[in-house]
Image (cartoon, rainbow, N blue to C red):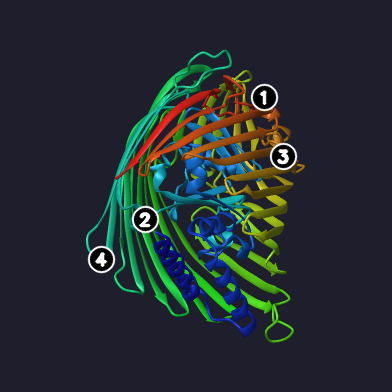
Amino acid sequence: MFKLKNIRVGCLTLFLAMMMPSYATNEDIERRALINQLKKLSLKELIEVEFFNPKGGLAARKVQKLTQTAAALFVITQEDIRRAGITRIPEALRMVPGVQVARVSANKWAISARGFNGLYASKLLVMIDGRTVYTPLRSEVFWDVQDTLIENVERIEVIRGPGSSLWGANAVNGVINIVTKSAKKTQGSLVTTYLGQGEERAIVGVRQGGQLNNDIYYRVYGKFFEHDHFVNEQGEAQQDNWQMKQGGFRMDWGASEQDNLTVQGDIYHGFVKQNISVFQEKQNDFVDLNGLNLLARWQHDFSNGDIRLQTYYDHTRRDRLILDEIRDTYDLDFQHRWQPNEKQEFIWGLGFRYSKDEMDNTFILTYIPKKRQDKLFSAFVRSEFKIAGESKQPGYKSTGDLRLIIGSKFEHNDYSGFEIQPTIRLLWKQSDKQILWAAISRAVRTPSRSDSDIEYNTLSDAGIIRIIGNHDFQSEELLAYELGYRFNPNCRFLLDISLFYNKYDKLRTGEPIDFISTPPTIIIKPDNQMFGEVYGLELSASWEILKRWKMIATYSYSDIQLHLNPTSRYFVKEMEEDDTPHHQATLRSLFTLPNNLELDTALYYVDNVSNQNVPHYTRFDIRLGWHAWKNMELSLGARNLFNKHHREFGNGNSISTIRANEVRQAIYMQLKYRF
């Protein structure tokens, strides 16, 4: 056993040595010193190194370590998800500093980063394996259908702040990419079951992974879940339960040492129930959900770079009481990375997206035209230069590593035309223990179908409110200033601090343009009559206190100041300032006990959200896990132990038809068996 363990460590060390590029003499010395340190670590300790310096690809369109990233990156690992007992992707995002996660009902979330949170949060780009799930209908994400077998998720990468120079419009306040495991990492069979009360009633998931030959790996999976209803303020059950069936596959083919091909797809069908307001009358809406997607990605590696070609097709259908929507999206993305020498790297790419939709309009909600086709053309370029970092003498450690990163995205869309979104970033690796970075970026949120083509009728105390689209609506603009510091003295501690100051212009307002006396009707049109500033601080710290005990803490503060143009008559500006909590904090403890037991706790604090009538709340979760046998894991847990039910988001001043409910206290039991 001892020999086998040493062989594995030795192979991993050799692999790391082969993967490291050839740098100057002094860096060779550093690399050999690092390899000697790695040789002394066990496999478990090697995994812990990655835990405190995780990898992600969002910040540079290439996988790199956190300490090499000039952006506010946070990575949620599969181990984080497993030990929190999490079954839903949106719930995992509570771990991220600077990200606001508020549950509106059993199947609805308001999720944003660095402010401007809401049920229809418009400034957060979300992807799954590079497939965009941000919808152009209302510039939002339908979180109720963004799902997979949670055990298939390898990591969730989150960037707070603009990522539009690489990922395009709408990556304004942040970018999220859910990365699933390769088929090679999911071999064998898995059966997972979940029983609970207060959230998911039941989950049943199965997965089978296999190998067709030496180079082709595959997996297939299926999942069924049924979610419990939430309650109102009086604790009365509401009709917002939720049910879904989903399946999918993935195949990874190593065609050669340089070529890799991935093909994957998912299909789902289910329903959600939601309480809505129709002319001030409460009604229960049964929403039928259907969708499928198919993605293919090919990568060819060179000695000094790689090329990547990805394409996908996405089909969704949502049948609702006030509107039915069918949408088809086709996307093509090409990328080339070239590193001519140790001091320069270039990445460039081209993209095309075609989206078509069809609406089944009603008197309440209408889109004109009923059918629409939109095209998006894009190109980007990113250059990284090492402008300092030589040692004083051969054989001595480098005095610092200073890198300059510049780039921009260029896009043309059918709503606002041509958009340019540049960035300039500096990364100073003062030593192996301290990293400083700074960035200035421009990003835009392009108009949605609702900004341009909507006709919506609702009822208020003042009479009928009619909202009509504005074909001259312009993109919302952001100029962001960021500063970050990371302190990583050893593989057991990491401190990450980010400061930001965002200046927004041409923000969306609803401008009253006419009043009809009989019947009393106010006509409102979207316009760009608001500007403002958001500033804040985000902090995260990971510390392995003992070999069996890890602590992860986060804290974030943000403040929003909005201002109206003199010509504006928008009347809810002050309320929008109060849609985001000023303070948020989390404290997670991962404690490994003897006899294959795990005791994990999580404490979340969220400040009050005055516009939504939500007081501050503290949430406490606990999980006890037991690896009964090598291939079987049993978990018992509870969520929201401090309150039987509490509100996280409300209807506030929004004219949204969705009625908010309260999150329930939940208990659960989970069993996973691999064979």
Q: Amino acid at mark 3?
A: Ser
Determine whether label 1 and label 4 are within 8 Å by CB: no
For the C terminus, the image quarter is top left
User: Of discs 3 and 2, which sits in the foreground?
Assistant: 2
User: Of discs 1 and 4, which sits in the foreground?
Assistant: 4
Q: CA distance from mark 1 to mark 3?
A: 26 Å
Q: Earlier in the sequence, mark 3 or mark 4?
A: 4
Q: Which residue is mark 3?
A: 568
Determine whether label 1 and label 3 are within 8 Å by CB: no
Q: Earlier in the sequence, mark 3 or mark 2?
A: 2
Q: Amino acid at mark 1?
A: Asn
Q: Which residue is mark 2?
A: 185
For the N terminus, the image quarter is bottom left
> Residue at left 38%, top 49%?
356
Q: CA distance from mark 1 to mark 2?
A: 46 Å
Q: Amino acid at mark 2?
A: Lys
Q: Which residue is mark 1?
A: 613
Q: Which residue is mark 4?
A: 214
| Residue 249 in sight | yes
* Residue 31 sits above or below residue 495 on the image: below
Residue 599 appears at what percent x and percent y? 54, 36
Q: Earlier in the sequence, mark 1 or mark 2?
A: 2
Residue 183 appears at what percent x and percent y? 33, 56
Helix, strand or loop for disc 3: loop
User: Of discs 1 and 2, which sits in the foreground?
Assistant: 2
Q: CA distance from mark 3 to mark 2?
A: 56 Å
Q: Amino acid at mark 4?
A: Asn
Helix, strand or loop for disc 2: helix
